Every structure is written in structure tokens, then in C-alpha cells.
């Protein structure tokens, strides 16, 4: 049977908790704040407040975050601004390549003194410095104790100290290339690719497939961000629960 947990969490996004949001609020009050849809309430609220009060925040998917950064950098360049544009990135580190490529392309196209900085805020228990390696307290510039990385190296420790997903890192270009080379071969026809097919669940939740149920909340959020209104069926469900 399919088992699912209403209180389940993502091992990466869970590191952006209350302590992290407090440090970000204290040390990066003027920065532009982004938060993935799966981060806990503290970071989520911080990004929503930045959006509402300063037009300087976004909560959404990785594409929403990338679009937000592109738009803010583009606007700063159009206004001829110099100095440093600082983004707090509340999601997995894997999207940093897309951000860097997009931002560098914009900066290279302009003769500008503008610089762009991306800050990864994660658990302070996992900072990696000579002081923490020796068991002492770390002192960072501005008295901020938020820095990505775990003492044991890359990967998510039990202390919640990174923004790098160990499961996403299991995918590699080498592995993808090996799979692609099998496509259309006799080995593939003999079942060599069967083990790589996604497991499909036949069961349904309230009449929906697992994929439909799992993406429902994200699709509602995307529509709200795009159109500024909540889907009618969502409003009806909420009102029915309150009745």
C-alpha cells in the first residue's frame, strides 16, 4: 500500500528553520529574500514579508526564484545602479549554476559597477571554520553565524547543516550517458533499462493519482503568483472545511 505522511519534510529545505530565519532577519535585513515552497514557516514568512513590504522577496519553485533574480538584476541594470545586489537563497544549492550563468550573461552585456552576491543561509551548528573544528565558537563578519557546509564534507548531516541534497547528487552526467547509450540496443530490449523505470503507484488519494495529489498545492501557489487569485476549487474546499 501507499503510505504518506502529512507532516513529512524535505531533508534539505528543513535546514531553513526558525534559527536561520532569525539570523537572516538580523544580518541581511536589506537583502532580497527567496524561499522555496518546501521551506519551513520561518523562512517562508520572511520571504513573503520582504515581498509584501519591500517588493524584495519571492516564494515559489526554483524557476520562480530564478525569474525573480533575473528580474531584479535586470531592473538594477536598467536603472544604472552600482554597488552590491545581495540575494538570500532559501533552497537547494543545485540551482546556483543556473543563477550564475544568467546573472553573468546580464552583467557582461553592460558596462556596470554592479555586483551580485548569493547567500546560502543554513544551520549555524554546521559551519566549517578552524574555530569550530577545534570545538570553539566561530566569529564571522557582522557577527553572523550562518554559513553552508558540514564538518564531514559535502552532504546533509543529522545536525541539518547544508543546502545540498544527497539524493539529487546521485544523478550524474556519467550515469545519464550510460543510460542513453543503452537506448535502442538489444540489451535494452532484453530488459536492461527496466530497473531504471520510475515506480508507479496504482492507488489513488481522494480519486487523484499520487502525482496529481502531490503537485496540487504547488500548482495553486503558481497560479496565485501569476494571476493574483486563488483557484476557485481551492477556495471551495477551504470554505467547506470551515463550515
Image: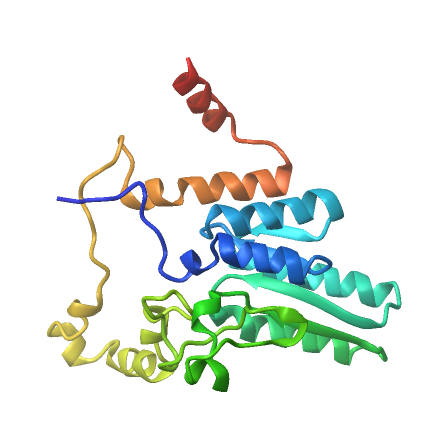
Which quadrant holds residue 167? Answer: bottom left
Name the residue: 45% across, 76% down.
149
Quarter of the image for the C terminus: give it. top left
Q: Nearer the viewer, residue 223 or 241?
A: 241
Q: Report x, y in % for residue 124.
A: 48, 67
Q: Nearer the viewer, residue 165 or 233?
A: 165
Q: Report x, y in % for residue 131.
A: 49, 83
Q: Is residue 240 above or below residue 160?
A: above
Q: In the orientation shown, which residue stands out farthest toward the top?
A: 243
Q: Does 205 sit left or right of 19 as displayed?
A: left
Q: Is residue 217 above or below residue 98?
A: above
Colouring scheme applied when the structure was drawn: rainbow
Figure label count:
0
Q: Report x, y in % for residue 72.
A: 73, 60
Q: Does 184 sit left or right of 23 as displayed?
A: left
Name the residue: 50% across, 75% down.
137
- Residue 94 appears in the figure: yes
Quarter of the image for the N terminus: give it. top left
Name the residue: 74% across, 65% down.
73
Q: Does 4 sit left or right of 61 as displayed?
A: left
Q: In the orientation shown, which residue stands out farthest toward the front?
A: 136
- Residue 68 appears in the figure: no
Which quadrant holds residue 104? Answer: bottom right
Q: Is residue 115 above or below residue 90?
A: below
Q: In the orientation shown, which residue stands out farthest toward the right?
A: 80
Which quadrant holds residue 140? Answer: bottom right
Name the residue: 63% across, 59% down.
67
Q: Does 58 sit left or right of 161 as displayed?
A: right
Q: Report x, y in % for residue 115.
A: 75, 75
Amino acid at each position: 500500500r501507499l503510505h504518506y505522511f502529512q507532516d513529512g519534510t524535505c531533508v534539505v529545505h528543513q535546514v531553513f528553520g526558525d534559527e536561520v530565519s532569525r539570523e537572516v532577519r538580523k544580518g541581511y535585513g536589506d537583502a532580497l529574500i527567496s524561499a522555496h515552497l518546501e521551506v519551513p514557516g520561518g523562512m517562508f514568512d520572511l520571504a513573503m514579508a520582504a515581498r509584501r513590504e519591500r517588493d524584495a522577496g519571492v516564494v515559489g519553485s526554483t524557476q520562480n526564484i530564478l525569474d525573480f533574480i533575473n528580474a531584479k538584476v535586470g531592473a538594477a541594470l536598467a536603472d544604472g545602479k552600482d554597488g552590491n545586489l545581495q540575494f538570500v537563497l532559501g533552497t537547494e544549492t543545485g540551482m546556483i549554476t543556473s543563477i550564475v550563468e544568467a546573472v553573468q550573461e546580464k552583467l557582461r552585456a553592460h558596462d556596470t559597477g554592479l555586483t551580485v552576491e548569493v547567500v546560502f543561509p543554513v544551520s549555524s551548528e554546521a559551519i566549517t571554520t578552524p574555530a569550530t573544528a577545534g570545538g570553539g565558537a566561530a566569529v564571522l563578519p557582522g557577527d553572523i553565524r550562518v554559513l553552508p557546509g558540514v564538518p564531514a564534507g559535502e552532504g546533509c548531516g543529522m545536525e541539518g547543516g547544508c543546502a545540498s541534497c544527497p539524493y539529487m547528487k546521485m544523478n550524474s552526467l556519467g550515469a545519464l550517458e550510460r543510460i542513453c547509450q543503452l537506448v535502442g540496443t538489444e540489451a535494452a530490449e532484453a530488459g536492461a533499462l527496466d530497473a531504471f523505470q520510475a515506480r508507479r503507484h496504482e492507488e489513488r488519494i481522494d480519486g487523484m493519482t499520487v502525482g496529481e495529489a502531490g503537485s496540487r498545492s504547488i500548482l495553486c501557489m503558481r497560479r496565485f503568483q501569476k494571476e493574483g487569485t486563488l483557484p476557485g476549487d481551492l477556495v471551495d474546499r477551504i470554505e467547506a472545511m470551515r463550515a
